[in-house]
Amino acid sequence: MIIETFRQAIQNVWSNKLRTFLTMLGIIIGVMAVIVIVGLGNGMTKSMRDSFSALGTNTLSIQVWGYGSRTVPVEEMYQLPDEFPELIQSISPQIDFSGSGTLKIGTTSYRWSTISGVDEDYTSIKSYTIAQGRGLQYMDIKDNKHVCVIGDYLNRVGFGGNGLGQTLKIGANKFRIVGVLGAKVSNAEMQQGTDDDCVYLPYTTVMRLTSQSSVNNYTAIMKDEGRANEAKTVVENRLQELLGTDSGYYVYSASEWLEEMNKMINMVIVVLTGIASISLLVGGIGIMNIMLVSVTERTREIGIRKALGAKERTILAQFVVEAATTSALGGVLGIALGYAVSMAANRLLPMLTSGTDVTVSPSFNSIAVAFGISVGIGVLFGYLPARRAARLNPIEALRYD
């Protein structure tokens, strides 16, 4: 019975191919839009997670601008890992030196490079590897040495891969390269301005050259990312104790930023998906309209079937299955179109947006939900015409011309 009903539904749908396609168009566009939008959201979320993972989602960023004449000595910050080893693994000062002079390698200037004063733990905090030479050491910090480690981009472009032992110039100051960091960005063409385009100096050297008496920025790595709030509270309490106020500092974790960004992305995706779903609603109205037309066109057929003994539920099932079949076919075509648009977008996005790593990644859940909704819309909007067909009086139906 069910198979026969489905076979008749396919037959009736196929007999009016153009009308069926036009009816399905709203469903096709709606399903495609939902798949692409949710896929784009997944891609943006993944890109965001990858970016924060490169920065380290288990890190705390600490800004200290002081209060009046009160500042926070570096030694006090260094005590945090010793006092709270279960929360904070290590901490490093970070002083921006980019504005103190142009970076020059030979006669070439590099204006987009990050130049910072840090300690010997910073590169491990930021998940760098040492590709050549060594990292900064305690004695470099203690003796204010004019040494540095550089990123893969500067080593490759500025020194042809042979930067170790060479010198570079920042403003009027020369620094000897004691180490080269491993690449973080796999695509060499996209390394400029990234974590691979960097120079790290001893922070004490930077303090002396800039005549700074205190450090305003620190990066700490947490022992357990799941206890980020505890670690943040510990740091805030210490800073409040040292400064005597809660307004002279700011502490935030990368995981907090990631969570907030995910919330924003999800909110945008929900809104865009809601807008795309309007197309599904329009498609449902189209199905209802065309099914009402079909009922009118097949009035005599319905009358004959009822006169031969067909029950109301049989007629009802016939038209509901036809509506569901139409919307299901629209859903399948929408899924195929959604995948095609996603693949095209993955090819076009890198060309249109330089350096982007965002992809459109359709998920099985979004496809299943979109398809389920499309079938549900067919059943919902097909029920009213089907009910009307099932309740036709067979005598009046046979008289219909």
Image (tube, helix red, strand yellow):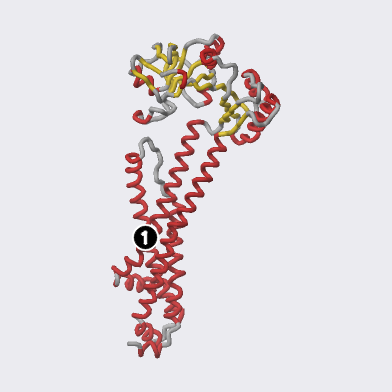
* Residue position for label 1: 28
Indicate whether 85 appears above or below 24.
above
Point 49% across, 38% down: residue? 49
Indicate whether 100 appears above or below 399.
above
Left or right for 65, reference 288: right
Toward the front, the furthest residue is 68
Toward the top, the furthest residue is 143
- Kind of residue at disc 1: Ile
Indicate whether 359 appears above or below 111.
below
Point 42% across, 76% down: residue? 385
| Residue 95 visible at all | yes
Residue 194 percent coordinates (x, y)? 42, 29
Left or right for 202, reference 228: left
Point 46% across, 41% down: residue? 46
Q: Nearer the viewer, residue 277 or 117?
A: 117
For residue 192, which quarter of the picture?
top left
Residue 220 percent coordinates (x, y)? 58, 26
Residue 381 percent coordinates (x, y)? 44, 70
Q: Which image quarter is the C terminus in?
A: bottom left
Secondary-structure class at tag 1: helix
| Residue 176 visible at all | no
Residue 327 percent coordinates (x, y)? 39, 65
For residue 21, which quarter of the picture?
bottom left
Q: Nearer the viewer, residue 390 or 79?
A: 79
Q: Which image quarter is the N terminus in?
A: bottom left
Q: Nearer the viewer, residue 177 or 295?
A: 177
Q: Nearer the viewer, residue 248 or 203?
A: 248
- Mark 1 Cα shell of 10 Å, populated few (<14), some (14-19), many (≥20): many
How many numbered marks are there?
1
